[in-house]
Amino acid sequence: MITPDSAWGIVRRHTKSLPAIYLSLNKAHGLCLAETVCADRDMPPADRSAMDGYAVRASDIAHCPATLRLVGEVAAGSSAQPRVARDTCVRILTGANVPPGADTVVMIEDTQESGGIVTVMTSVKAGSNILRHGEDARRKDLLLTKGTMINSAQAGVCASVGKARVRVTDKPAVTVICVGQELREPGSRVRSHEIRNSNGPALCAALQEWGCGIITYLTLPDDLRSLTSEIRRALKRCDVLILAGGMSVGKYDFVRAAIESAGAAVRFHGVAMKPGKPTLYATASGNKHIFGLPGNPLSALTAFHEFALPCIRRMSGLAIKDCRPSFMLPLTSDMNSKGGRIRYVQGKIVWKKTGPQVDIVESQSSADLVSAGKADGTIVVSADATHLSAGSFIQFRPWRRIP
């Protein structure tokens, strides 16, 4: 068996981003840039007022109260340029270009205006309340790198440099197949020897949270011929195939054989991790990826977040460093571990006065989905760790967006 990091290294080496497409900016939310974005002009392109008030010469208000004659107005978007001379001022609105002759903006709250005369009640330093020409960026400065996901701020940056259309990487189509004669759909009646299929809805929800648009989901019995046939069909219509169940070496565990019969190449099968040991990864021609996840729900979700989701993120064009995110956070209590292989322990973020920490969520087994429902992700415990004290900083792998 290989380590989780080695397994991810294999996945990473075989994964390529999907082809880039052009989309209008308002349809690109959640997708990753397949190009860099640079400033098309200085930002801001001129000195601008940071608030409503009056554009003045600082020397004229060195001693207050000071009276100034109002000689004009500049609103945001106006091309007017009334000159500010000695003992005069111009009314200015937030975002407007500072008129020639002025070097300071006085807030309207610090003034009184009557009959064309403005009284400045409080002195301010020269240059106050002005956004300087080019202070945010200069023309041709790099603003966003390739692989950056477009969320609200990034969309704003693209709009500010005139990019109504952006070159982005689309997200892969995914098929989820849950394998097991004992599986029944959530709405079905179940007998004591049957179980409701929780892996399918859980994996589909995780994919939807990432924003995968095309997800096909089905459940199949433990049958080599039907599995092989369905894997072949799935590889024609999707980029990533995720199978849950049938990954061990039991009499009815046919998934690996079906994957190989369908013409895919197995890159690894078995990872030194707990839970998730039977995890499999295979590839097929055309940048197709197959993940075989254990059937136990906690194992399936752990392996999905460690390998399958990072692969999907990479195919979506996300920068490598962001595909498998983790944080270093302190534990709230002591933790013991048997060591021997890397463990993934359920954890919940709690907010203390000193910042976020991680609570251990006790789990009974790799089938304990209840514990996963209480957790925000997993604590990664190294293979040689046997005891971690409260306050120790640990690697935490989030499974959802943390508020």
Image (cartoon, rainbow, N blue to C red):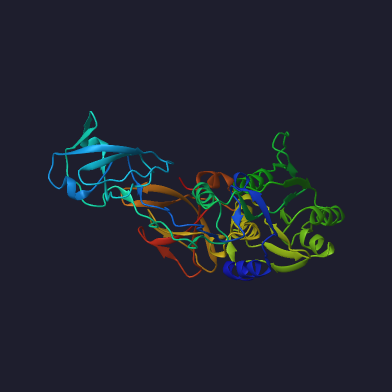
Res 271 → quadrant:
bottom right
Q: Nearer the viewer, residue 65 or 214?
A: 65
User: Can you give x and y, in whole percent of width and height, for residue 328 in the image?
Assistant: 42, 60
Is the C terminus in the top left, top right, bottom left or bottom right quadrant?
top left
Q: Nearer the viewer, residue 95 or 85?
A: 85
Q: How many numbered circles are shown?
A: 0
Does residue 118 appear in this view? yes
User: Can you give x and y, in whole percent of width and height, for residue 264 in the image?
Assistant: 79, 65
Q: Nearer the viewer, residue 141 or 299?
A: 141
Please indicate whether residue 370 sits to the left or right of residue 90 in the image: right
User: Can you give x and y, in whole percent of width and height, for residue 327 in the image?
Assistant: 45, 59
Residue located at (45% from left, 66% from top):
386
Q: Is residue 393 above or below residue 72?
A: below
Q: Is residue 393 above or below residue 350?
A: below
Q: Nearer the viewer, residue 96 or 253?
A: 96
Please indicate whether residue 112 sits to the left or right of residue 183 in the image: left
